Image (cartoon, rainbow, N blue to C red):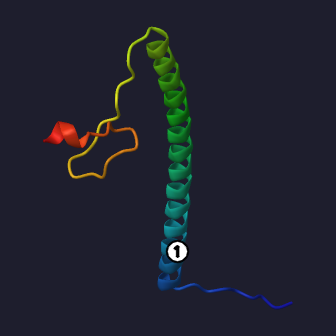
Amino acid sequence: MSHFTIQFSIRDILWTTLVAAIAISWWMDRKASADSSAELRAKLSRMSIEMVKLEQDVRRLGYPTPMPPTLPNSPPSRFAPIKSQAATR
């Protein structure tokens, strides 16, 4: 019966620890990112539903619906009012 012993150097143990630490931290980051992404999608869905309900209430009460904000130097939105040439003269 022969006794087989495996010998590891300190360098081997440090490399193994480094690889394990990187793999575990990558996995934890991916898991947290996926959880955060799912949470944000659910929040966006709830807010979208609430926005639709509020717009319906505004229309039902007879108020004009607000125009979405535009940024300076942005192309005209399909929702933006079109200025007539007569008004610009």
Q: Nearer the viewer, residue 34 or 69?
A: 69
**61 lies above or below 80:** above
**48 lies above or below 56:** below
Identity of the residue drawn at 30% across and 52% down: 75
**27 lies above or below 65:** below
Q: Position of residue 61 (x, y in %)?
A: 45, 8
Quadrant in the picture for the N terminus: bottom right
Residue sitting farthest toward the right: 1
Q: Position of residue 56 (x, y in %)?
A: 51, 18
Q: Position of residue 82 (x, y in %)?
A: 31, 40
Residue identified by numbered label 1:
19
Quadrant in the picture for the C terminus: top left
The mark tally for this picture is: 1
Which quadrant holds residue 41?
A: top right
Q: Nearer the viewer, residue 45 or 35?
A: 45
Identity of the residue drawn at 39% across and 13% down: 63
Q: Nearer the viewer, residue 59 or 10?
A: 59
Identity of the residue drawn at 31% across and 48% down: 76
Left/right of residue 60 with respect to residue 4 in the rendered view: left
Question: Mark 1 belongs to which amino acid?
Answer: Val
Q: Nearer the viewer, residue 45 or 5?
A: 45
Q: Position of residue 83 (x, y in %)?
A: 26, 39
